[in-house]
Amino acid sequence: MVRRLPAIVWIVVVLVLIDQITKAMIFASIAVYDSVTVIPGLLNFVHVRNEGVAFGLLNAVDLPYKPVLTAGLALLATAGIGLYYTQLQPDERLARLGLSGILAGALGNLIDRLQHGYVLDFVDVHWGDWHFWAFNVADAAISIGAVLVFADLLLVKRHVPDSV
């Protein structure tokens, strides 16, 4: 039974596992708001908690039941991604691959929200005083997946009937 699962399912499972394992490692080894230099002047591992949504939106907003709200939004987004995935044709491989990354990322961050009430972000890319938003494996999977979906939409030619 396990061998019959499509490759896309395995991709989602592996990405979610990598996301959760890396977050557990950071959680266990770096105190909140501390950082460890990985590549001086370029990359740190940090321990920050995103209580908001994408890119820290709503992070500083104090709302009653904010963890429930953000988890609900993540659950709706995950369901929407899953529904969209079912509408893809078998030959839309690039879009399927991209959506599997988006789905894996959404699930990884949803697990955090349900378990902790926030998402643990730990990759801090910086140059001088400029810092990109801290992110995690799930966020990277979502970003790469989105690029693949857009590439499929823009670059892959499908048979379109000639105009009459």
Image (tube, rainbow, N blue to C red):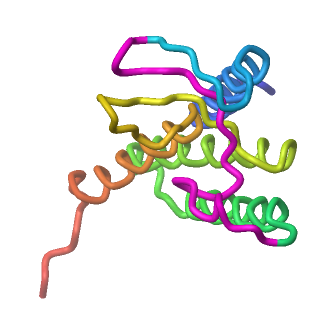
Q: Is residue 35 left or right of residue 66?
A: left
Residue at 64% across / 24% down in the picture? 34
Residue at (82% x, 59% y) in the render: 67
Give above or below for 30 relative to 10.
above
Residue sitting nearer the eye, 159 or 129: 129
* Location of residue 123 with respect to 78 vertically, above or below: above
Q: Quadrant of the C terminus?
A: bottom left
The answer to whether residue 111 is left or right of residue 149 is right
User: In which quadrant is the N terminus drawn?
Assistant: top right
Could you say which is closer to the camera, residue 163 or residue 87? 87
Which residue appears at 55% of the width and 43% of the height?
A: 100
Bounds of the magenta span?
39-63
Q: Residue furthest bottom?
A: 164
Is residue 4 at all visible to an observer of this figure?
no
Q: Quadrant of residue 163?
A: bottom left
Quarter occupied by residue 16: top right
Q: Position of residue 127 (x, y in %)?
A: 30, 29
Q: Is residue 20 in view from this perspective?
A: yes
Q: Is residue 108 left or right of residue 84?
A: right
Residue at 68% from the left image edge and 67% from the top image edge: 61
Give coordinates of residue 51: x percent, y percent: 71, 53
The front one of 77 and 56 is 56
9 w.r.t. 54: above or below: above
Between residues 32 and 149, which one lies in front from this camera angle? 32
Q: Is residue 65 above or below residue 136?
A: below
In the picture, residue 121 is in which quadrant? top right
Quick check: is 51 in the magenta stretch?
Answer: yes
